Image: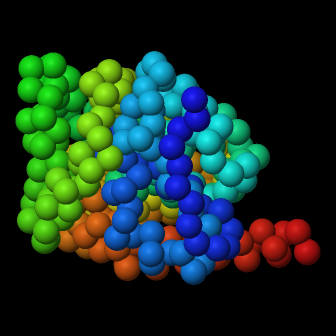
Amino acid sequence: MSLYTQTSGAGPDLVLVHGWGLHADIWDEFVPLLETAFRITRVDLPGHGRSAWQGQATLDAMAAAVLDAVPQRAAWLGWSLGGLVATRAALQAPGRVNALVIVAGTPCFVRQPGWQSAMLPGLLEGFAAELRADYAGTLHRFLALQVRGSEHAGSVLRILRTRLLAAGAPEPAALQAGLEILRCTDLRAAVAAVACPVLLLMGERDTLVPAAAGAAATRLFPDARVVLIAGAGHAPFIQQPQLVANHLQAFLQQHDARSDEFNA
């Protein structure tokens, strides 16, 4: 069974991949800012929203499932867990991902030797344990962490909570798989093979993925830059949708201009 997608707008293809526990409706305030410039395909990850869970418990399986559901060639934007999925897709099928935008994400979410701008491993392990005991409470606590310390935290949290179950509750197995992917994935060495330009959009006040991780990650990709969204937490496209849309559009248009110059 194919993943659920919805398409709108006109122009070059742009794929949006959401984060852990949510679904394609999380982009509702963001997509209208882009529809005159791009044909946008939003996707529900396996076991999230309207996509059935068929045991895609690994990052490779999730990326392959999304690749099967979206246009053959597109720019990809992935948020948080979606950033890992988009990055893996760019490695699995380099001819299909012509630009990669990672929002509030890096190639490695958990601290490692030489990689300290990241989550403590115990945070994700704790969420996995709590999820088994208190499914709904754990989801809401995770949303609260996404906005902690950021500007306009209350309004952003209301949007996150409103969207959370709007398309149905995520499958517990899919949530556990997502946490395990976040905890165990380390693509730092692999991303040297990413063939397309990369933009990392980081929230200045993100307490889950520190802003400093963006600058560190740019040194791992062959062609990457980072933009810091002032005052934002883990969901800058909700907190500053127009600013994020402007950065995204400028990056993709510059990439298209470079491609046209190369092919001339």
For the image, the number of numbered tags is 0
Quadrant of the image for the C terminus? bottom right
What residue is at 27 percent from the left and 25 percent from the top? 172
Q: With 11 as the anchor, is 143 left or right in this view?
A: left
Camera-side residue of 77 and 168? 168
| Furthest residue in direction right, as rendered | 264
Residue 128 lies, with reference to residue 208, above or below; the image says: above
Can residue 219 be seen in this snapshot?
no
Q: Relative to 16, is 64 above or below?
A: above
Q: Can residue 56 be seen in this view?
A: yes
What is the x, y in percent for residue 126? Answer: 14, 25
Question: Which residue is depicted at the point 37% across and 47% down?
Answer: 23
User: Which color scheme did the rendering employ for the protein?
Assistant: rainbow
Snapshot quadrant of residue 22: top left
- Please name whichever residue, 93 or 162, is drawn nearer the observer in this view of the structure: 162
Please state the horizontal and vertical placement of residue 153, each as a whole percent of the image.
12, 65
Q: In which quarter of the image is residue 173?
A: top left
Q: Is residue 198 left or right of residue 68?
A: left
Q: Residue at x 21, y 29 (%)?
A: 124
| Residue 120 falls left or right of residue 1 | left
Tell me the quadrant of the picture where the N terminus can be found: top right
